[in-house]
Image (cartoon, coloured by chain):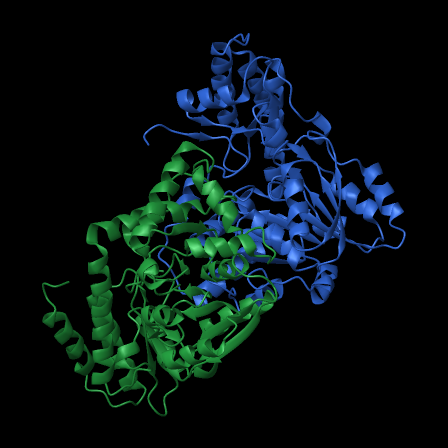
Chain colours: A green, B blue
Amino acid sequence: MYEKEYLMLPGPTPVPPRVLRALSEPLINHRGPSFKKLIEDVTEGIRYVYQTKHDVLILPASGTGGMEASIVNFLSPGDKVLALSIGAFGDRYATIAKNYGCIVDKVDFEWGTAIDLDVVKAQLDADVNQEYKAILVTHNETSTGVCNDLEGLGNIRGDHPALLLVDSVSGLGVMDVRPDEWGLDVVVTAAQKGFMIPPGLAFISVSPKAWEAYAESKAPKFYWDLGSAKKFLEKGQTPVTPALPQYTGLREALKIFQEKGMDYMFAKQLYLRDMTRAAVKALGLKPLAEDAISSAAVTAVWAPDGIEAKAINKKMREEYNVVLAGGQKQLENKIFRIGHLGYVQHLDILATIGALEMCLQELGYPVVLGQGTKAVQEVIMSRKGII
Amino acid sequence: MYEKEYLMLPGPTPVPPRVLRALSEPLINHRGPSFKKLIEDVTEGIRYVYQTKHDVLILPASGTGGMEASIVNFLSPGDKVLALSIGAFGDRYATIAKNYGCIVDKVDFEWGTAIDLDVVKAQLDADVNQEYKAILVTHNETSTGVCNDLEGLGNIRGDHPALLLVDSVSGLGVMDVRPDEWGLDVVVTAAQKGFMIPPGLAFISVSPKAWEAYAESKAPKFYWDLGSAKKFLEKGQTPVTPALPQYTGLREALKIFQEKGMDYMFAKQLYLRDMTRAAVKALGLKPLAEDAISSAAVTAVWAPDGIEAKAINKKMREEYNVVLAGGQKQLENKIFRIGHLGYVQHLDILATIGALEMCLQELGYPVVLGQGTKAVQEVIMSRKGII
């Protein structure tokens, strides 16, 4: 394709050219000394981005594979778990636990809202015999652009023995997460989101308490066995053949995190979020999530009355090569989603909003051209020198 | 690294430069029209290499993930299966089935030999109530360089209702496999072997009879659910985010298969095997496998008396950058293995044998330099014009 594409998705994200180039290194022996150095380096780099001293393991899988690993390694059939869902990925997490024989108490919150910590507290208080073995929670709900308060959830869990299992597939590396301080026992993420590399790897952190649960787990497993992954990592290997291009890409991407620092990376993401939301509001559109719970990775926006969200996305893609995401399940055709994580910069947002203005105008929505882009520019200029 | 490395492993294999370049294409939306075209094209290309009209699905996993998928989709806890093992990967297949609750009748054949079809026949004849739900078999046993007779096994299975589940991770695309004609219900392979692309994808073919078993299967699953993969493929998608670089690499690699034709690809592999074996024998060394059952993907060789296999591999790697594989489990330090699949050509074998001669001589084994390379040259010259 000759035309430049703007991949404004909540994953896969655009990837820096230096990372794309690093994918093409000649293959190496995954049981040899070069790979040992590679896996040791990237494991340390991932822990830097994770801001954790817990073990971190790399799985040859998508984020969903990491979620499955977080269930089958720490739980057993018949275990009672509390699943908190605010959207499609919260539903998925509950389904995986159910498929592996867990007894799932699922609490659903309205799509577009965050978990209500008071409701969670009441649920845990009602569990007087402390039967819950785990709490499953989505950090950043990709389907709605809502971010849950993991620190608050960790506080509410308190001394309850349940493990806190976190799907942060689209959150980690994008927003500040502190597994050790907040008591997050297991945190799953994936390569193609905050890490700025192509899909093919999942990462999972494991607290000492989670390792104790691992020893008790009776769920069937082979490919997802984290004990095996840990044992192999100790000799600089993986149990099965790893996706080598993603490893060399990851090494390059991690250099960027280390050059820029996590403070910069998190601040940049908030900045991209803020300019996207400012523009959307300036156009008279309504984001699905309130400001206080809004994701730094993706912004979901209600399509204006009388205009189908799919028509907006189709026009954006066909006329301007700007790729947005749509709504899932009950939000299908009602919202569109602008991803702003990975290798996305401020002028990409400006371009996206400019294209959106033109599409909306042609679809019959009243837009003064420049109305949204001006809002983007104002955020850019107000933070000049900070980012 | 400046020095050129000879990756003579049974996977990951060297990858053609045009495939390495294809890994670095900009990321695309895995729910959009470009990916739909991509997955449709590569699925057709894989079926060409598989020589099958069965469904073929692509999984975001290593070959072991494909093996796990072949168990959890077609079997249930408590199912009786016959596992035929001739080495480390046969053992792995049996272990996966056991971990998922199958009752595994395991028949072990001596490492370095193939399955004995008479023994299998007796085993099936003894199963008068036809309790076996599946027969698990390794096509090409990577740990020993032995290839099993799948056509013969298919004939012996005959009308027994057991599914024939085949791990052809290092065999498919290297040696002639005919799932439809030979009655192979499920055939698993992986990207980094015969397909000449980097690791990160597994492929699995599913016969109509296997789909019937899928409908009955009660093993827990989410990530490996092939019914879900089939449903998504019908709309040109995958259930979870796919490893996109491997898909674009695969598209390029499949063009090579189509340009050259399968007859050429299979003949080339036999030619590489024959020159490797001729050279090894000319040096007075003994291959682990007899000629009749020898693999076209990898040749395992006994280390000469008094010389450790690890010392040979170490010297080959450190002094000549030739990477060989070692022995696994009971063969550790007793054999070395020369991989000759993927992007390997005749002069790579010549160079490898030349380096091996120098290493063996320095390790005290009596070698006249040129003794092995001459044998390679003779095979090359005898087949000139055919390959």
x%, y% of residue A147? 34, 73
Give the vertical position of A151 relative to A205 (above or below).
Answer: below
Give the vertical position of B125 relative to B339 (above or below).
Answer: below
Q: How many marks?
A: 0
Left or right: where A22 falls relative to B356: left
Between A333 and B328, the one lying in front of the other is: B328
Between A328 and B97, the one lying in front of the other is: B97
Picture quarter containing residue A348? bottom left
Is residue B231 among what the camera can see? no
Most extreme residue toward the front, as rendered?
A128
x%, y% of residue A61? 48, 55
Is residue B45 among what the camera can see? yes
x%, y% of residue B93? 65, 46
Picture quarter containing residue B116? top right
Give the vertical position of A218 relative to B384 (above or below).
Answer: below
The C terminus of chain B sits in image quarter: top right
Left or right: where B288 falls relative to A113: right
Between A365 and B202, the one lying in front of the other is: B202
Left or right: where B256 falls relative to A167: right
Rendered residue at 41%/25% (across/down) = B321
Rendered residue at 49%/17% (across/down) = B354
Rendered residue at 88%/46% (across/down) = B126
The N terminus of chain B sits in image quarter: top left
x%, y% of residue B155? 82, 45
